[in-house]
Image (cartoon, rainbow, N blue to C red):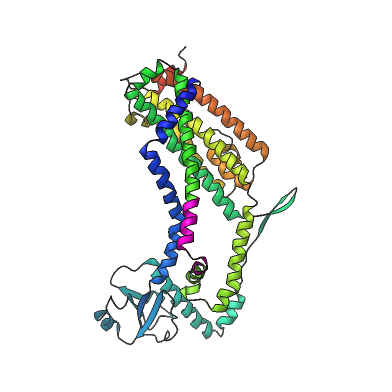
């Protein structure tokens, strides 16, 4: 077995056996799965909490008009506001809703009194309920009934298609944007995470003088490459385990705790106008069909995304970007005596990576822009930017050129980093400057 292979094996096995690796591998999927599961469970169990609102309506316009829902019950009272506040019982009522006599001309005078700060959902639901009733009263005053207005309201949904040589394909701008941004964020996060591990590993070996023993048996370049590739394999292992465990946890928890039909009804209640229950014919008819149609269109549009290409590109740009930045992080680790000395060298390296993440957000608005093209070609920014562009469709020659340039950038940075690494790895007790690093680049073997 070659020397580099031995170093790769050592780095890989040493890190995957650490408790921190095992804990994060198990904890990561739980946290990621919770992002999908917690909102669903909250939507399910929030319906069990009902707020009772005591209503003091001085205008007399809302008697019998405020409709109750599963989450909110209105109880009309004839007390004056001062009396209602005096006898208010938080165990009986959640809040007091005060509607002044001149509410039609002064909606800002409406007040909600409660024993503690009310949650935003409650306030928003009350605002929408009152808004609907006031609008209804004003429409009647103008001779327009609610049924006529509902018939006039029209919902427009634009279906997008891409024209290809094989015909047309259904697409979804929302899905494409989500997939593109997710790929860019993961590349950005993993490069930082595992690049920093390379740097800390080099600093640790240098500080403990272990590297002196290792260098007696292997060349500095072999040690650096073995460390970089070994940690890259650790990252890929953890990433694949995260995907598998996240999907498994999400599936199991969803099947155990979430009733799909009930959740659908609850979510429709939550999204109904002004927070009131929707009529049965609406729930079972137009809205239901509309929701099904949107879900169907969303799922069909997923077929337009070339997931095999996306996964292959992700693996390539993750490895390419990590190897490029990992070599630079290794060079920084070799040049300093401790993490506190890395700040002056970290900034120039991390700026392109941070810039690529910032640029990626604007590219989502226009993936075919010249800015998007050039930043997807530059090796220091292409791993993030190109991953954002690929779901929108990239010409094959652009993708090939970007990959070739990334490989070239990796080779160049590895060569430069190796020259710094071979000198700095055995240098102790000296504050290194940029000028000193420049000299190391031209030292002869």
Rendered view: 39 above or below 124: above
Outermost residue toward the left in this view? 86
254 magenta-colored: yes
x%, y% of residue 371?
A: 58, 41
Rendered view: 182 above or below 329: below
Residue 33 in view, yes or no? yes
Q: Nearer the viewer, residue 412 or 371?
A: 412
Q: Nearer the viewer, residue 223 or 68?
A: 223
Rendered view: 42 above or below 431: below
**Residue at 42% over, 70% down:** 47
Outermost residue toward the top in this view? 445
Q: Nearer the viewer, residue 9 or 222?
A: 9
255 magenta-colored: yes
Tell me the magenta residue range: 247-263
x%, y% of residue 1?
A: 50, 21
- Report the magenta stretch's main SS: helix
x%, y% of residue 77?
A: 34, 85
Residue 438 in view, yes or no? no
Quadrant of the image occupied by residue 312: top right
**Residue at 32% over, 31% down:** 340
x%, y% of residue 37?
A: 45, 58
Is residue 368 shown left or right of residue 104? Answer: right
**Residue at 61% over, 77% down:** 151
Number of marks in the rendered image: 0
């Amino acid at each position: 077995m070659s020397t580099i292979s031995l170093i790769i094996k050592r780095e890989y096995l040493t890190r995957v056996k650490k408790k921190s690796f095992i804990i994060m591998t198990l904890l990561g999927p739980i946290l990621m799965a919770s992002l999908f599961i917690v909102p669903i469970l909250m939507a399910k169990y929030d319906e069990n909490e009902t707020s009772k609102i005591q209503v003091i309506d001085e205008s007399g316009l809302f008697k019998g008009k405020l409709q109750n829902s599963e989450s909110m019950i209105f109880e009309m009272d004839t007390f004056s506001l001062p009396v209602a506040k005096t006898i208010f019982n938080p165990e009986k009522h959640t809040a007091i809703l005060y509607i002044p006599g001149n509410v039609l001309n002064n909606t800002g005078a409406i007040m909600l009194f409660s024993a503690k700060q009310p949650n935003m959902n409650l306030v928003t639901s009350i605002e929408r309920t009152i808004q609907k009733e006031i609008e209804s009263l004003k429409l009647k005053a103008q001779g327009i009934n609610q049924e006529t207005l509902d018939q006039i309201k029209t919902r427009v949904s634009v279906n997008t298609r891409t024209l290809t040589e094989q015909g047309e394909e259904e697409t979804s701008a929302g899905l494409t944007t989500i997939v593109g941004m997710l790929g860019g964020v993961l590349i950005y996060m993993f490069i930082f995470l595992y690049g920093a591990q390379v740097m800390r590993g080099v600093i640790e070996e240098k500080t403990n003088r272990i590297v002196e023993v290792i260098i007696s048996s292997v060349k500095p370049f072999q040690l650096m490459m073995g460390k970089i590739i070994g940690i890259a394999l650790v990252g890929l292992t953890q990433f694949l385990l995260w995907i598998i465990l996240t999907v498994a946890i999400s599936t199991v928890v969803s099947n155990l705790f979430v009733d799909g039909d009930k959740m659908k009804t609850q979510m429709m209640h939550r999204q109904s106008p002004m927070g009131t229950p929707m009529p049965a014919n609406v729930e079972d008819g137009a809205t239901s069909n509309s929701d099904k149609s949107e879900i169907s269109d969303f799922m069909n549009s997923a077929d337009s995304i070339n997931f095999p290409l996306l996964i292959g590109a992700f693996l390539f740009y993750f490895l390419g970007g990590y190897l490029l930045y990992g070599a630079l992080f290794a060079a920084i680790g070799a040049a300093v005596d401790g993490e506190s000395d890395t700040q002056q060298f970290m900034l120039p390296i991390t700026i392109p990576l941070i810039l690529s993440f910032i640029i990626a957000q604007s590219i989502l608005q226009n993936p075919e822009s010249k800015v998007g093209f050039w930043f997807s070609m530059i090796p220091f920014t292409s791993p993030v930017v190109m991953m954002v562009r690929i779901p929108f469709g990239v010409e094959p020659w652009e993708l090939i050129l970007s990959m070739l340039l990334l490989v070239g950038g990796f080779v160049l940075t590895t060569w430069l980093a190796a020259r710094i690494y071979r000198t700095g790895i055995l240098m102790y007790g000296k504050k290194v400057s940029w000028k000193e690093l420049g000299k190391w680049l031209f030292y002869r073997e």
